Image (tube, grey):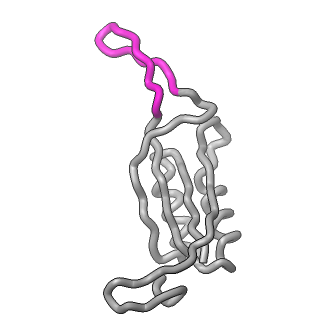
Amino acid sequence: MKLITAIIKPFKLDDVRQALSAIGVQGMTATEVKGFGRQKGHTELYRGAEYVVDFLPKVKLEIVVESDRVEDIVEAIQTSANTQKIGDGKIFVSSIEQAVRIRTGETGPEAL
C-alpha cells in the first residue's frame, strides 16, 4: 500500500477530485494548509499599507491506495492540477505498513 500526498492550489481541488473519481478513487482526505516553495509568497496592499504574505494557501490531499494504482493516480493528479505556473504543487509517494478499518477490524488492502 502507498500513501500519495499532493499539495495543490485550492482552486484546482474540484478538478483533481473529478479526475480521481473518474478513475475509481473512492476516498481521500483534503486539508487546508499554508506554505511556500519557490513562489516565496507575495506582497499585498491592505488599507494603503503594504505587507508580505509569506505563506500561501494550498490544499493537501492524502490518498492511500494499493501499490499497483499509484502511477495512474499520480498522473491524474498531475494532469488535473497543472496550470503551467509556479506554485502548482508537489506529489509525494510513501509506503504504508498497515491499515485498519476501525468499524470492522479489516486490515491491509481490505481496510481501504
The quadrant the N terminus occupies is: bottom right
Q: Is residue 42 magenta?
A: yes
Q: Nearer the viewer, residue 78 or 54?
A: 54
Q: Nearer the viewer, residue 40 or 75?
A: 40
Reply above or below: 11 against 69: above
- Percent of width and height locating residue 76: 63, 64
Reply above or below: 107 against 53: below
Asked whether, in this view, residue 100 is left or right of residue 83, the answer is left
- Percent of width and height locating residue 42: 50, 23
- Percent of width and height locating residue 16: 53, 59
Choose top left, top right, bottom left or bottom right for residue 22: bottom right
In the image, what residue occupies the spot 52% across and 27% down? 41
Q: Residue furthest front?
A: 97
In the image, what residue occupies the spot 48% across and 80% down? 99
In the image, what residue occupies the spot 56% across and 27% down? 40
Choose top left, top right, bottom left or bottom right for residue 67: bottom right
Q: Which residue lies furthest to the top in this view?
A: 48
- Percent of width and height locating residue 64: 53, 72
Reply above or below: 97 against 58: below
Reply above or below: 54 against 79: above
First to last magenta residue range: 41-55
**What is the number of callouts on the image?**
0
Instruction: Give the prevailing secondary structure in the magenta stretch.
Output: strand
